[in-house]
Amino acid sequence: MRIVVVGGVAAGMSAASRARRQDPDAEVVVFERGEYVSYGACGLPYVLSGQAGDSTDDFGALVARTPAQMRARGISVRLRHEVLSVDAGAATTLVRDLNSGQTRTEPYDHLLLATGVAPVRPDWENLNAAGVHVLREIPDAQAIGASLGSGAKRAVVIGGGYIGLEMAEALHLRGLKVVLLESAPQVAGRMLDRQYRAEVGAELERGGIEVRAGVNVEGLHARAGRVTGVQTDAGTVRADLVIVAVGVRPRVELAQSAGVRLGRTGAIATDARMQTSVPGIWAAGDNAESLNRVSRRKVHLPLGLGANRMGRVAGVNMAGGEAKFPGVVGSAVFRVLNLSVARTGLTHEEALALGLDAVSADVRSTDHAGYFHDARPLQVRLTAERGTGRLLGAQFLGHGDAVKRVDVVAALLHGRGKVQALAEMDLAYAPPFSSVWDVLLVVAGKLRAMI
């Protein structure tokens, strides 16, 4: 059996490793158009900021397995090989060696498309000027590092989502004057409810990062091929480094060339086994849809754990085993300077948009017993369905490990749990770690009285 994997990062390498373990006799080949495989792309901003690795260019710290290590496991890894097209009828791929420029046909019995996402690149003037960057892969981070090394002092980050927020922090920690531009009225627009988004924006401002929300970028200014500023509908913002983080799109060109069906989100549609509409072709990772277990709708949610888990499921099934991807509940956690933020399930606004009769309760407390000198604020919003009491989601604002209470709610959401179940949970208690009535129990009790 010959298993061909297109893409060698999270989903692709997880699939290759699991397929090899499932069937040690299978030939597993991975084509990766870049120079790196099996690395944690989510850590890129933290290496750039100096919070990870031995230096601000130690991107090797993010590599989990090298090509040599994968080959030692019996997996053929071919770097700088780009798959150009797929002939599903003949069960072949057309592959170009980017070093030699030569192309050749490669057969497969099973083909996994793990091509991920690409950053959205708006049609702006001077988008290709020196000092203008996106961040998705190690070479992108290396290019940003080169701009920092050339003496950049003023940075503009365009986009207030996960990548934009993380890069604003990273550049601020590197000593740059940072302005964050967001076209929506607030940053973190699709991640949190309005009042929680306001807290994120306030934390950025407290930390010295200027936020300009509700402004639209019209183009970039450049001199002698290097960026000098960003033109918005509210004026020009000076910059000698610009990060464009306005979103991502799933890479589905290969899937389309093979006649694979896309879902309503624009990502690849699969069943729970990660099988696409074309026999023998599978998809996993950021280019594929997921089932949201709370809304029961298909979503495109490009996050690390889901990509790795999809890859494992696809690897097992391609090698003759049986596994299913259970779906997601939309759990995420991120940090903005001294504020940690987490969410799972649906926000109140998302639930209302889906036509659900949602009700939410908010509680402000501390992360452990309030009489401790180091007790810190913790804010929680819990959302449920009126009448049924079914949990719909939660949002947390706090510090450090405190927001990881989100995982308790995520566990209940996976089982379609109710507010009553959370209110009755036997949570661990000791004063250095929580209050006797943990904030989760308090907010669940308050919400229970509202439904």
Image (cartoon, rainbow, N blue to C red):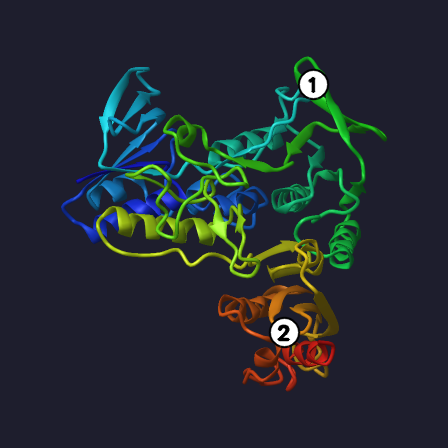
User: Which quarter of the rendered picture does the N terminus lie within?
Assistant: top left
Residue most toward the top?
A: 224
Residue bearing the label numbered 1: 125
The residue shown at (63%, 74%) is: 389
Horizontal placement of 352 versus 429: left or right? Answer: right
Question: Residue 36 vs residue 166: left or right?
Answer: left
276 or 447: nearer the viewer: 276
438 or 394: nearer the viewer: 394
Q: Nearer the viewer, residue 9 or 279?
A: 279
Closer to the camera: disc 1 or disc 2?
2
In the figure, is residue 112 to the left or right of 142? left
Would you place residue 166 above or below residue 235 in this image? below
Q: Between marks 1 and 2, how big is the CA–CA gap?
A: 52 Å
Q: Secondary structure at mark 1?
A: loop
Q: Which residue is mark 2?
A: 388
Dot 2 crowding, Cα within 10 Å, few <14, some 14–19, many 20+: few
